[in-house]
Image: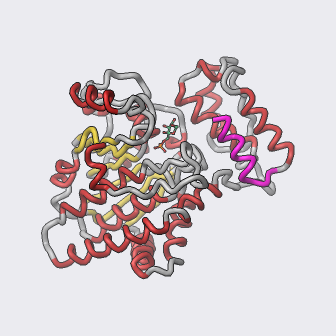
């Protein structure tokens, strides 16, 4: 987290007093008391006063990790005047990282779009669902989550290069077959709780495009963040920027894909929405009723990424073999979690799988090399 605060200074041209506050924040971690949130006109200010009340004056290191992390990113927006009217209002402190995340993965984007367009041509010809294509796109959406800029700066390396076939052995729970069974009939509403911008978002949009193009879904709703957070988490403006980036490609397979996305947004088959719950530190079982009732209309909810997975489990240290469905039974519709492990919370693993993976990789819980695709229908 201190390194991320320093990266915000290096990657923006904020005024000296803003940078001094960012340096101050970095220096307070982890042992100084939580910095209070000043009223910065953000719509979630009063909610944050409530969230922080029980932890006032406590050192960062002592408060629940997910609250500390989520608050850290919200504080960066207060310091950089993201919400306050003025010349800095609306500047995304992570924009450079998000742009680089796209630009450095253009080769992978090109090859994925060629494959996607071929699958869609096949889908038009055949009546039945091309399950192989759907499973492959679920794997791309999973491994796209490995490209997480809060861990690896896009400036350092291109983590979008991976061959999904060779990754099979890295999946600790693989419910893809059950997911395709659930999607055999057509005309569903499928929602996505989206995670990162960049190549991960392109992978998600490919899956979305295939679901709409093969009529598995007649409507897809993307649930996005209302403000920048966790470095690369996607907002509505990031989806629109990504589509513009794809539309400007000199590769026809990419521009065709972008055109379909634009048409689906225009026809409201693809809906982009945001909610402050997605940037709150709350467990998913604390979801507001209005949002819960909206989600209950979905036939399947795809939940992306590590932070969302932690929220599914309330970021509690469940025994890793705890039945996943027993914990997430509160969710108002069937879900499938697509997540690479980057934190020490997980459930629904078999004892022999835990034993095997722990033996082969001591960092299996946090290095993003292992994934789960877990369905609860
Ligand atoms: O939700 P994502 O983007 O998959 O990952 C976010 C995340 O893994 O990055 C941090 C560093 O590991 C974790 O605290 C957090 O869960």
The residue positioned 42% from the left and 44% from the top of the image is 305
Q: Position of residue 116 (x, y in %)?
A: 32, 70
**Which residue sits at x=83%, y=39%?**
20
Give the quadrant of the C terminus: top left
* Quadrant in the rendering for residue 311: top left
Q: Which residue is at the front of the view, 291 or 322?
A: 322
From the viewer's perspective, is 180 left or right of 310? Answer: left
* Residue situated in front as seen by the camera: 345 or 84: 345
Q: Quadrant of residue 341?
A: top left
41 relative to 51, above or below: below
| Residue at 18% in and 61% down | 131
Give how far across and how far down residue 256 sits, in percent. 40, 79
- Up/down of 191 relative to 293, above or below: below
Against 366, is 317 above or below?
above
Q: Between residue 163 and residue 68, name the one nearer to us.
A: 163
Colour pattern: secondary structure
Judged by its main secondary structure, the magenta piece is helix
x%, y% of residue 213? 29, 71
Q: Which quadrant does the N terminus fall into?
A: top right
Name the spot of residue 79 as percent of width and height, x first: 75, 41
Identify the residue at the far right of this view.
16
Residue range highlighted in magenta: 1-14
| Left or right of 24 on screen, residue 273 | left
Is residue 314 in view? no
Numbered circles on residues, count? 0
Q: Residue at 32%, 46% (x, y): give it.
A: 296
6 drawn magenta: yes
Q: Is residue 332 magenta?
A: no
Left or right of residue 26: residue 285: left
């Amino acid at each position: 987290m201190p390194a991320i605060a320093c990266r915000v200074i290096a990657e923006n041209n904020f005024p000296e007093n803003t940078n001094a506050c960012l340096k101050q924040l970095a220096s307070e971690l982890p042992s100084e008391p939580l910095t209070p949130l000043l009223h910065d006109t953000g719509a979630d200010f009063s909610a944050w006063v409530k969230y922080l009340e029980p932890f006032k004056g406590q050192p960062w290191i002592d408060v629940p990790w997910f609250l500390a992390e989520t608050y850290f990113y919200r504080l960066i927006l207060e310091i950089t005047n993201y919400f306050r009217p003025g010349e800095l209002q609306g500047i995304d402190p992570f924009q450079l990282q998000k742009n680089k995340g796209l630009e450095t993965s253009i080769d992978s984007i090109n090859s994925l779009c060629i494959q996607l367009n071929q699958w869609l041509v096949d889908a038009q010809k055949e009546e039945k669902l091309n399950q192989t294509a759907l499973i492959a796109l679920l794997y791309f959406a999973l491994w796209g989550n490995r490209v997480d800029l809060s861990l690896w700066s896009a400036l350092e390396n291109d983590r979008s290069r991976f061959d999904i076939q060779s990754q099979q052995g890295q999946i600790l729970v693989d419910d893809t077959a059950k997911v395709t069974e659930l999607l055999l009939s057509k005309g569903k509403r499928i929602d996505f709780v989206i995670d990162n911008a960049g190549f991960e978002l392109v992978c998600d949009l490919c899956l979305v495009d295939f679901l709409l193009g093969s009529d598995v879904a007649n409507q897809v709703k993307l649930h996005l963040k209302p403000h920048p957070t966790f470095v690369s988490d996607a907002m509505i403006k990031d989806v629109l920027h990504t589509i513009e980036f794809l539309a400007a490609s000199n590769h026809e397979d990419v521009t065709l894909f972008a055109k379909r996305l634009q048409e689906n947004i225009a026809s409201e088959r693809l809906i982009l929405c945001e909610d402050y719950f997605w940037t709150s530190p709350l467990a998913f079982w604390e979801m507001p009723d209005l949002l819960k009732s909206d989600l209950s209309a979905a036939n399947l909810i795809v939940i992306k990424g590590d932070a969302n997975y932690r929220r599914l489990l309330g970021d509690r240290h469940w025994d890793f073999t705890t039945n996943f469905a027993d914990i997430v039974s509160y969710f108002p519709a069937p879900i499938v979690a697509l997540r690479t492990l980057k934190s020490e919370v997980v459930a629904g693993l078999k004892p022999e799988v835990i034993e095997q993976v722990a033996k082969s990789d001591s960092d299996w819980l946090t290095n993003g090399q292992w994934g789960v695709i877990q369905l609860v229908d």
